[in-house]
Image (tube, grey):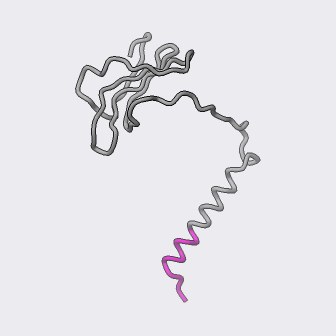
Amino acid sequence: MSISYRYFELIICLLFILFLGSCNSPADSPYEPISFNSLTAMPGNGRASAVAFVINDTGYVTLGRTGILKDSLKECWAYNSTTYSWSQKAPFPGKPRVKAVAAVVNDTA
């Protein structure tokens, strides 16, 4: 008797869940657990395919898009890690783009 494809899929999914669940317990990890604190959310539009970089104690997020093949953005936001606040900077001077790359050399991006 053959097993139907649907049951095969279900069995594979259950095994996958069991496998992941058994590997996610703290006892299985050689590392100490870490936790994160939520800080100030970035104002403005949510975005995908943005570029981010850090200069000194300030993080920058710029460019990207608001949706799939929609509305490329030129705005630039700076996050001050001392005051936990965001400020909008001058927009990117070139054409809007997605999946850009940034490098910082001698405190210049």
Quadrant for the C terminus in the image: top left
Residue 62: quarter of image? top left
Residue 11 magenta-highlighted: yes
Residue 39 location, x and y as percent?
57, 28
Rendered location of residue 31, percent (x, y): 71, 38
Q: Splitting the image into 4 quarters, where does residue 76 fall? A: top left
Q: Which image quarter holds the N terminus?
A: bottom right
**Would you place residue 9 above or below residue 51 in this image?**
below
| Residue drawn at 38 percent across, 36 percent down | 47
Q: Is residue 27 left or right of residue 91?
A: right
Residue 78, above or below 67: above
The number of numbered badges drawn on the structure is 0
Where 69 sits versus 61, above or below? Answer: below
Spot occupied by residue 11 in the image (x, y as percentages of width and height): 58, 72
State which region is magenta: 1-12
Nearer-the-camera pick, 102 or 71:
71
**In front here: 104 or 96?**
96
Identify the residue at the far bottom of this view: 1
- For image coordinates 23% across by 27% down, the residue present is 95
Residue 18 shown in magenta: no
Q: Furthest residue to the top?
A: 106
Q: Main secondary structure of the magenta part?
A: helix
Q: Is residue 75 left or right of residue 58?
A: left
The residue sitting at the left extreme is 95
Q: Is residue 100 above or below residue 25?
A: above
Residue at 50% in and 81% down: 4
User: x and y percent of residue 50 in the render?
Assistant: 38, 32
Seen as rendered, the residue at the extreme right is 27
